[in-house]
Image: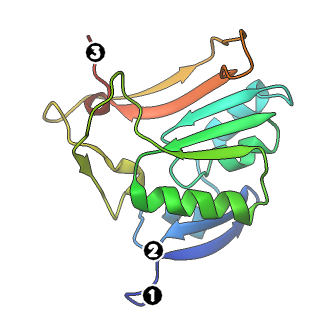
């Protein structure tokens, strides 16, 4: 049993070193017990990425995908809204000695506003804005269309969201 003052557990996996949330029963548990997370998605994304790819990861969580992808990309910007998890993401970038990965504590939105935010300890990747609808439909979104104008444009954007986090119209 981990004591009440533990923030994270350090795991060393083929995907990298990660400080994972103590109570997380999804990404953290997968990394602790299997040494990997979402291997199929990671393999697909690694095939798409190259040394020239500029990658934007929205909802990066602790970096289980962003960190291994950063090894094959030119640059990665990892956005995470959860204030507790973004700290672990920053630690994980440092643990893996990545110099091409920028971490931003931001929530993606189509407007500037203050958001009510739900923090989940057992599913820290499931932390999100307070849902606008009850029982939202879940979906995955991978955008492959590349923005190629200008140095700051993302070459590839990868995100996982629920409909409760995305505002249409």
Residue sitting nearer the eye, 144 or 129? 129
Who comes first in sequence, dot 2 or dot 1? Answer: 1
Instruction: State the SS at label 1.
Output: loop
Who comes first in sequence, dot 1 or dot 3? Answer: 1
Q: Cα distance, mark 2 to mark 1?
A: 8 Å
Q: Residue at x 82, y 38 (%)?
A: 72
Q: Residues within 10 Å of mark 2 (few under 14, many from 20)?
A: some
Res 42 → quadrant = top right
Give the mark toward the camera: 2 or 3.
3
Q: Cα distance, mark 1 to mark 3?
A: 42 Å
Give the mark toward the camera: 1 or 3.
3
Instruction: State the SS at label 2.
Output: loop
Instruction: State the SS at label 3.
Output: loop
| Side of 42 where 98 appears, left or right | right
Say which residue label 1 marks: 2
Q: Is residue 82 above or below residue 1?
A: above
Q: Cα distance, mark 2 to mark 3?
A: 35 Å
Residue sitting nearer the eye, 168 or 42? 168
Q: Residues within 10 Å of mark 3 (few under 14, many from 20)?
A: few
Point out which mark residue 22 bears.
2
Say which residue label 3 marks: 168
> Residues at badges 2 and 1 in contact (C-beta under 8 Å)?
yes
Residue sitting nearer the eye, 54 or 19? 54
Q: Residue at x 34, y 50 (%)?
A: 127
Q: Residue at x 26, y 48 (%)?
A: 117
**Snapshot colouring:** rainbow
Point out which mark residue 115 bears.
none
| Side of 130 where 64 appears, left or right | right
Q: Residues within 10 Å of mark 1 (few under 14, many from 20)?
A: few
């Amino acid at each position: 049993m981990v004591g009440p003052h533990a923030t994270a557990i350090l795991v060393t996996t083929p995907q990298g070193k990660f400080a994972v949330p103590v109570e997380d029963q999804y990404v953290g548990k997968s990394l602790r017990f299997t040494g990997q997370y979402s291997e199929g998605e990671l393999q697909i994304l690694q095939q798409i990425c190259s040394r020239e790819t500029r990658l934007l990861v929205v909802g990066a969580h602790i970096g289980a995908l962003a960190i291994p992808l950063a090894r094959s990309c030119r640059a990665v910007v990892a956005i995470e809204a959860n204030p507790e998890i973004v700290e672990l993401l920053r630690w994980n970038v440092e643990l893996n000695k990545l110099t091409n990965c920028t971490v931003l504590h931001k929530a993606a939105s189509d407007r500037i506003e203050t958001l009510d935010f739900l923090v989940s300890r057992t599913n820290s990747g499931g932390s999100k804005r307070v849902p606008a609808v009850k029982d939202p439909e879940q979906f995955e979104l991978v955008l492959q269309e590349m923005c190629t104008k200008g140095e700051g444009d993302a070459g590839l954007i990868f995100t996982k969201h629920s409909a409760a986090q995305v505002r249409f119209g």
